[in-house]
Image (cartoon, coloured by chain):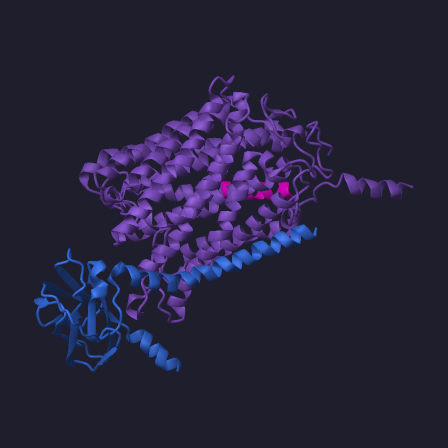
Chain colours: A blue, B purple
Amino acid sequence: MSSIRKSVSKLFLATVGMFLFGFALVPIYDVFCEITGLNGKVTGPTFSEYEDIGNREIKITFTTTNNNGMPWFFDSDSSQMRVKTGEQNLMSYVFTNTTDKPMIAQAIPSVSPGKGAQYFHKTECFCFEQQYLEPGESISIPLKFVIDPDLPKDISSLALGYTLFDITKDQMSKQASN
Amino acid sequence: MSAVIEGHHDDHHHGPAKGITRWLYTTNHKDIGSLYLWFSFIMLFIGGAMAMVIRAELFEPGSQIVSPEFYNQMVTNHGLIMVFGVIMPAFVGLANWLIPMQIGAPDMALPRLNNLSFWILPAAFGVLLATFFMEGGAPNFGWTFYAPLSTEYAPPTVTYFIFAVHIMGASSIMGSINVITTILNMRAPGMTLMKMPLFVWSWLITAYLLIAVMPVLAGAVTMMLMDIHFGTSFFKAGGGGDPVLFQHIFWFFGHPEVYIMILPAFGIVSHIIETFSRKPIFGYDSMVYAIASIALLSFVVWAHHMFTVGMPIAGELFFMYSTMLIAIPTGVKVFNWLSTMFKGSLTFETPMLFAIAFVALFTIGGLSGLMLAIAPADFQYHDTYFVVAHFHYVLVPGALFSIIAAVYYWLPKWTGYMYDEFMGKTHFWLSFVSVNLTFFPMHFVGLAGMPRRIPDYAMQFADYNMIVSVGAFLFGLSQLLFLYVVLKAIFYGKKATGQVWEGAQGLEWTLESPPAYHTFETPPNLETGEAKS
């Protein structure tokens, strides 16, 4: 009967291992997205200077979307601009809390086409910060970015989309539990 | 003196206990097999009733019978019940009945675990079905429960759903551990791996697949639970998570899962075709290797379910080609079945009819699968009725027909009574016509753009949908006939012989019908084919 016991323990270990593997898929997926630019995921603020800045002109389109049920006003100063690779650029975004309650929001970026995401460097941005606004308060936040001169030749335009999420409930419950 | 004789009697002719406790406490593989099969039969009618509601709503365009909210609950629970409550338990039931008898073992390796893995299953489905009577209604996010539909926008009953999935997963994992342990350790002396019956082979590989992917599903629902109740952000975009990650994890489980629902069918059909062709299966070794390669490939094709989420072109190509590769081992199997029948002395009893229908109709489902695998074409087919037609062709005239065929084939062995051949054939022809009437026109409306999971449709799809609904009602009624045939065999059937079928080969046919409560307590001798029981 010890051979049965051996089989069972091996299979039980395999089960536990596969359960953990399910969770390991989360970081694996993040790394995979970063390498391939899957889903247009962009990394946090980075700063770099380029010696050879190239001389290409790239069209950048800015889109803003409110997630379902998010009442804020959220828009960029202009919807489109032409930039040169390797140069610093600036775009401002306006956030207005249109409700009569204080709220916390977070904007999540995505670059399209996904292949170009890793060449879109933000040097200063609000992308991973939570924004708190009083009722009726409005704020303008700048986004500074550089387009990497190594951007593949077949990409002549990039779109940067921001989706604004209402995370008031999550944050409030976190503070309450702290 | 009499005490000694009684003791002896208890040792060797120990029958089942009496009353309900026989079933509650049983550790006998035959009892547990019957429990699984009856459970899945009951669930077939519950899930089938939900399909009837869906088809009644879609009988005509416009909203008539149920609200869209309830329609969503029907679609979701129909899928969940048919996958986890009908096909999977039926295969586990067949495994319990057949594996010990086919490998010459006295019982499963872990009989008490076997009892537990069955009895938590009604609990799981009790929890799932109870959600219909709760505030917010039953789960309504589709059987694939994509986040954020199943997290941020889910009804409050989603927690019960998560709990139910955990229990079903635990049941499957325990069942699989049992199957693998039994097959690896308890084969009769002389039965090498490459001499095992194909049903045993197909289940061995299926059980490995289950152990590899059910824990991943458990992980996915655990992440959902944490997102909903504990403030994590695995799938919440607002917190830095990614809903697409859910789809990757789900389909990493989901694609092997769809093969879990078809591989045992391959084993069953192989046995039935060789019996009624009166020839051994053509290409036994290649059958085994084909099952193994399908199982291995199932781990690297998952993203073909999500071509449209936005993927690098290299990813689309990889998943497209790897998916198409599966057609090769599947083709090997189909041609082996045809070659087995070629120049065989064929007879067409009910199990054979279902098995031949399986080969033909499963191949249609496989071909539409190849069409769906073509990434650029999939952008048109995605989430249309074409997909619904495809997976119903592989699951209904595929997996379900194989289970029905298995019931007809082994019922005389299990019960000792023959079913009514005329009624069986009537059941087959009704099912065969109605299944095609139901699912074939779905290809046409799908290609024309009718979306799935929507309770209403555009006017131009009206005629086909009416045909589909009529077919579905007929198919539903035909399965009541199946229940009648089974009950009639059990209560009024003619006595069956031990061999049952003229061409039947394998250890289970060397036993009498019905087999004794405990069989193969001493292993059979494979050389002579004689069983000492």
- Tell me: residue B362, above or below residue A26: above
Is the magenta region chiefly helix, strand or loop?
A: helix
Residue in front for this viewpoint, B260 or B445: B260
Q: Nearer the viewer, residue B36 or B175?
A: B175
- Could you tell me residue B114's position as x and y percent? 61, 49
Magenta span includes B32: yes
Please identify the quadrant where the N terminus of chain B is shown: top right
Indicate the quadrant where residue B520 lies: top right
Please tell me which residue is depicted at 59% across the width and 31% down the height of the picture: B490
Residue A143 lies in what quarter of the image?
bottom left
Whole-percent x, y for residue B314 in the image: 28, 50
Percent coordinates x, y for residue B175 in the rendering: 56, 49
Would you place residue B494 above or below residue B128 in this image? above
Residue at point 40%, 42% (across, down)? B49
Q: Is residue B67 visible?
A: no
Residue at position x 54%, y 36% in the image: B199
Residue B226 in percent (x, y) is at 41, 67
Residue B304 visible somewhere in the drawing: yes
Nearer to the camera, B485 or B216: B216
Residue B314, magenta (yes or no): no
Residue shown at the point (41%, 63%) measured from the top left: B223
Q: Which residues are magenta?
A: B29-41
